[in-house]
Image (cartoon, rainbow, N blue to C red):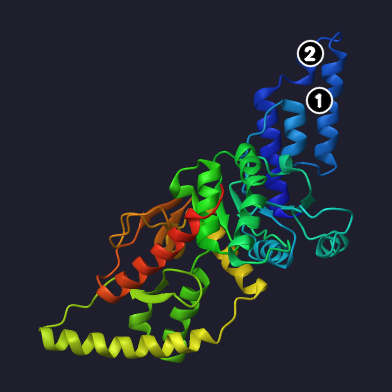
Amino acid sequence: MPKSTLIGLIKEMIAKFEEELPLYSLSSSDAARQSELLSYIAKITEGETDMKSRSKIGGKNEGCFNKITVVGAGDLGIACVLAVAAKDVADKVVLLDLSEGAAKGGTMDLEIFAVPNVEISKDFSSSADSKVVVLTVNSLGNAQTYLDVIQSNVDLFRGIIPAVSHYSQNAVLLVASHPVEVMTFVSWKLSSFPKSRVIGVGANLDSERFQYILTNLLKAEVLAKDAWVIGEQGEDKVSSWTSCNVAANQTEAMAARNSREKVANRAMEVLKGKGQRSWSVGLSVADLTDSILKDKRRVHSVSTLAKGCCNINSEVFLSLPCILGTSGVIEMVRLEEDPLVQEKLQSSAGSIHDLQQQLRL
C-alpha cells in the first residue's frame, strides 16, 4: 500500500474515533447506529476514504485536504487537470463539465484511462470545499462583435460564479477565461469575495518565459530575478522591474538602464514568438495553484485589482507582481518607477474600464 494511502487511512480513523463512541459502548438496542459504523469501517477497508464517505457518516465535511475544482471541460480545462495531476499539487481534482447533452469529448478519455484523484461531474455540489476554483470556460455562442463575445462570457459566469462561491466560500478563484482582466473583474463582482481571493492567470506564463529567456538565452541571470511582464495580456503587455541597482552616479545609472532595456527588448521579441497553447496555460495554472495551496509565498505576475497602483483610479484588474499564499494575494510587490510603464498601464486600465462599463452584470 502506498505511504500516502496509508496516512490517509490513519487520518480517517483518527477523525472518526474522535467523534464516535466505540462499538462496544453502544447498546444492543442501537442496532441502526452499529450498522452505520460497521458500514463505514467496511468502506475504509475497501479504500473508500474520500471526503464524501466521511460526510455521509459523521454529518460533517472537514475540508482537511487540498481540493481543486476546474470549471470547464474544454481543451484548457483538461490541460489544467492534467498539469495539476502531473505536479501532484492537490489531493483531489474535480472537473466540472458544463457542456450540454451526452457528448463528453476529452472527459471520456479521462474516464477511460482513470487519471488518479480526478472526479468528473456536472453537479456544482461536487466542487464543495475546494481550496482553489479554476475557471476556464468561454462562451461558444454566435456573437458578432467583440463586446457581444465578452457579454456572452459574462452571461455564462452569472450562472457559474454564485454557485461555486456558495459551495466553496473560502476558495481562491483563479480565472483563465478570456479576456482574463475583464473576466477576473466579473468574477470578483459576482462572488463578493475579497479582492485578494480573486485573481487571473494574467502574465504569469509570459513572466516565467521572460525570466527563462533572460537567464538561459541571453545569459542575463542578474537581471532575470527582478524582471516581470505586467499589464494587459496580449499585445499591450510590458516588461518591468521590481528593484533597481543603485549606480555610483547619474551617468552610470543611465548607462545601466539603457543596457538593461536593450536586453529586455531582445527578450520581449523572443517572447512574441511564443503562443499561449492550452497545455502551456495549464502548466501555468498548476504553478499558481501550487504556490497557493502550499503557501509558498512566491511572487507571480497575476491579474489583481490595480486600483491605487500607478495612479489608476478605476476598478480594473491588471497583471502585477504579487506574493501568493493560501489566502490568495498576500502583498503586491512594489515596481520600479518608470513613467513609460506607468503610462502604458494607465492606458490599458482606461480601455478595460471603458469596456467594462458597457457590460451588463
User: In whole angstroms, how far apart are the C-alphas of marks 2 and 1?
Assistant: 11 Å
Q: How many marks?
A: 2
Residue 68 at what x, y percent from top left?
A: 64, 51
**Within 10 angstroms of label 2, few (less than 14), some, or many (20 or more) residues?**
few
- Residue sitting at 46 percent across and 91 percent down? 217
Q: What residue is pinned by disc 2?
A: 26
Q: Position of residue 332 (x, y in %)?
A: 35, 58
Label drawn at residue 217: none
Nearer-the-camera pick, 113 or 209: 209
211 to the left or right of 261: right
The amino acid type found where label 1 is placed reads Leu
Q: Position of residue 221 (x, y in %)?
A: 37, 83
- Which quadrant of the structure image shows residue 227? bottom left
Density class for disc 1 (Cα within 10 Å; few <14, some 14-19, many ≥20) is some
Check contact, mark 2 vs mark 1: CB within 8 A. yes
Q: Secondary structure at mark 1?
A: helix
Q: Is residue 299 visible?
A: no
| In this view, the mark in front (2 or 1) | 1
Residue drawn at (81%, 60%), measured in percent from left and top? 107
- Please report the residue visible at 64 percent of the width from the left and 38 percent of the height from the top: 167
Residue 68, above or below 276: above
User: Which residue bears the numbered disc 1?
Assistant: 37
> In the structure shown, which secondary structural element does the residue marked by tag 2 occupy?
loop
Q: Is residue 33 visible?
A: yes
